Image (tube, rainbow, N blue to C red):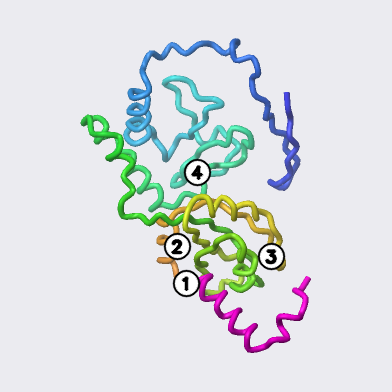
Amino acid sequence: SHVVVDSKWGCEDKWETAFVEDVEIIPKSENKMDLCQLLLGFLCFYTDTFPWHAKAVCPRLSKPGVFIDKSKLQLHTSEEQWCIEDPFDLKHNLGGKCTPSGKQRMLYAMRDSFQKLQSAEKWSSVCNLRGLSGACYLKTRISPSVTPVNLLDAFSNFDLVRLYFPKFDSGQRLQVFLEFNDASARRRAHTLNEKLVVDCQLQLHYTTQLSLEEACHTGKWATYEMASYRMQLQVMTARVPSLQQQPPPE
C-alpha cells in the first residue's frame, strides 16, 4: 500500500497509488486476439458502442460487458462531458476539459482510422500528419499581471519561436500558447513547469496546433516573435550603452 494525502479538492483525500509488484498473481487474460484485432476493437468500441453521455471510462471498476454510470463515481460531470476517471485521483476527470469540437475531432480520427485499417490500408495512412506543421506547443494559464515581455524573458533561453497572447482582458486568468520548432525544444522548455513568473506559477501542458487554432476563434490574439524581441533588445542596448553595465534585475 502507498497512500498519498491530497487536499487540492478543498478537503483531505487519501489516494491509493500502489502497484501490484508480483505480476504473477494477476489472473491471466482469456482474450486470444492479437494486437491488430485489439486496436480495431478499441476504435470500434469507443466510437460506435460506448455511450459517452451516460457512462464513464473506469478501468478500476469496469468488467467485460459492464458499463459504469457517471453518477456512481466521485466525479462531477454533465451529460455533455466525457467522463474518464483518473486511476489514482478519483475526483479528477481526465476528459472534463475536452471541448465539443475536440471530441468530434477525436471521434472522427478514430472512425477514419478504423475504416482504413479494416480495409487493409497501410499503418502510414492512419498516421499521416500532412497539413500540420512540425511545430510543437505548450500552453499555460497566467494571471492578469503577467505581460508578454515577462513570458518572453522567462523563455528567452529555451528556443521559444513565438508567443500567442490574448488581446481581450477578462480580468481573470488567461491562457497563452508557446510555439517551439521541435519536440526537443518543447521538452526542454517544459522543465520551467511551476516556475514563478511575476505572481503566477506556470502550469505548462503539452498542446497542439489544432487547440491553438480553436482558441484563436474565441477572440483576438497577438503574436510575439522571439527573434524580433531579441533584435529590439539588441537595438535598445546599442542605443543606451549604460544598459550593458547595469546588473540584471533580481
Of callouts 1 and 3, which one flags the residue occurring earlier in the amino acid sequence? 3
User: Quick one: quadrant of the N terminus?
Assistant: top right
- Look at label 2 and name its amino acid: Ala
Residue topped by disc 1? 221
Q: Which residue is mark 3?
A: 197
Q: Does residue 249 sit above or below 52 in this rendering?
A: below
Q: CA distance from mark 2 to mark 3?
A: 23 Å
Q: Earlier in the sequence, mark 4 or mark 2?
A: 4
Q: Position of residue 96 (x, y in %)?
A: 52, 46
Q: Residues within 10 Å of mark 1 (few under 14, many from 20)?
A: some
What span is in magenta? 223-250
Under tag 4, what secondary structure? loop
In the rendered image, which residue does mark 2 sit on?
215
- State the quadrant of the C terminus: bottom right
Residues at marks 1 and 3 touching, judged by CB atoms closer than 8 Å: no
Mark 4 vs mark 2: in front: 2
Mark 4 and mark 1 in contact? Answer it, CB < 8 Å: no
Residue 106 lies in the magenta stretch: no
Q: Residues within 10 Å of mark 2 (few under 14, many from 20)?
A: some
Disc 3 marks a residue whose amino acid type is Val
Kindly report the secondary structure that dominates the magenta region of the rendered protein.
Answer: helix
